[in-house]
Image (tube, rainbow, N blue to C red):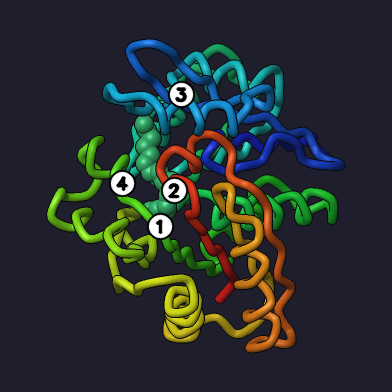
Amino acid sequence: MEPIKIVADSAADLTALDGVDFAFAPLKIVTAEREFVDTAALDVREMTDFLARYKGRSSTACPNVDDWLAAFGEAEAVIAITITGGLSGSYNAALTAKQVYEERHPDRRVHVMDSLSAGPEITLHIERMREMILAGRTFDEIVSSFSDYKTELLFVLESLHNFANNGRVSRAAAAAAGVLGIRALGRASAEGTLELLAKPRGEAKSLAAVLANMEKYGCQGGQVLISHCFAADTAERLAEKIRTAYPTATVRTHPCRGLCSFYAEQGGLLIGYEV
Ligand code: X90
C-alpha cells in the first residue's frame, strides 16, 4: 500500500492530523505594518487584537506554488484540498504545484480538490480522507469518492467588513451586518462563493435561523463541526441546540485559525455538516 499524504491550506483550520501524513500551506494576512503567516505558530488572538486596533488596509494572500511544493514535501502520493477557488487563488496555485511536482518526480502523483468552501466543511472532508487512508483504501478510491461525500457550510458573521474591503462581497451586501446586532447568515454556494440568506438580529434569532437553514439545506444528523472566531460560548450554545434537534448528530466545536478568523471576524461561526 502506497503511503498517502493529505495536504491542505490553512483555511482548513487544522494544524495537525493523527495517524496519517499531513501538512498544510499557510495563507497570509497582510497589512502595511505587519504580515501574519497562518502557521501553527501564529498567535491568532494577538493578530485579531492587532487588526482591531489597526487603522490601515488589510488583505490576505493565498499560498504560492513554492508554499504548496513545501507542503507536498517528499511524499509519493498527495491528496490536496484547497479553500474555494471561487474566492481564492489557492486552488490554482496548488494545481500549478502539482504540475511542477509531477514533472520533477515522474513516479509521484498529486490530486488537487477544490473544496468550494472554507473552514469546517474542508475539515470534514479531510477527516473522511484520513479514515479512508487508515482503512487501507487506495489513492484512486479516495479521489473518486470525494464527490460522494455530501456536505454543506453555513456561516453567521457579525461583520462582513473584511470581505467587503477585499472585494469578496459587495459593499451593499455587507452594509447591514454589524449594525444594531444584525448578522449575516449565509452558505457556501455551489460555485464556492458567499450566498447571503438572512439578516437575523441578535444571538437567539441567529441560532434559530442557523437551525432552520440546516434543515432546509439537508442536515439529517451525522457529523457537524462548528468553528468559531473567539465565540466558544456561542458555538457551544449552538452545538447544544443542534444536539437537541438532531439526537443522532455528532457535534463538535473548534477555534478558527488565522485566515478564517480574519474573514469570519470576532463572533463569527462557521458550521460544516454532512447531508
Ligand atoms: O486567497 C486569499 O487571499 C484568501 C481569500 C479567502 C476568502 C474566503 C475566506 C472564507 C473564510 C468565512 C466564512 C465562510 C465563507 C464560505 C464561502 C465559500 C471563512
Residue 77 appears left or right of 20: left
Residue behind mark 2: 264
Q: Earlier in the sequence, mark 1 or mark 4?
A: 4
Residue 110 x/y as whole percent: 57, 32
Q: Which quarter of the frame holds ligand 1?
A: top left
Residue 146 appears left or right of 134: left
- Are there few (<14), some (14-19), or many (20+) residues within 10 Å of tag 1? many
The residue that appears at 68% across and 52% down in the rendered structure is 254
Residue behind mark 3: 28
Residue 184 x/y as whole percent: 33, 63
Q: CA distance from mark 2 to mark 3?
A: 15 Å
Mark 2 in CB contact with mark 3 (< 8 angstroms): no
Pointer 1 residue Cβ closer than 8 Å to ligand 1: yes
Q: Tag 2: residue type? A: Ala
Residue 217 x/y as whole percent: 44, 79
Q: Tag 4: residue type? A: Gly
The residue that appears at 13% across and 55% down in the rendered structure is 172
Q: CA distance from mark 2 to mark 4?
A: 17 Å
In the picture, which quadrant includes the N terminus?
top right
Mark 2 in CB contact with mark 4 (< 8 angstroms): no
Residue behind mark 1: 157
Pointer 2 residue Cβ closer than 8 Å to ligand 1: yes
Tell me if residue 116 can be seen: no
In the picture, which quadrant includes the C terminus?
bottom right
Residue 50 x/y as whole percent: 47, 25
Q: Earlier in the sequence, mark 2 or mark 1?
A: 1
Image depth: mark 2 or mark 3 in front? 2
- Are there few (<14), some (14-19), or many (20+) residues within 10 Å of tag 2? many
Decide: is 253 above or below 96.
below
Q: Earlier in the sequence, mark 1 or mark 3?
A: 3
Tell me if residue 216 can be seen: yes
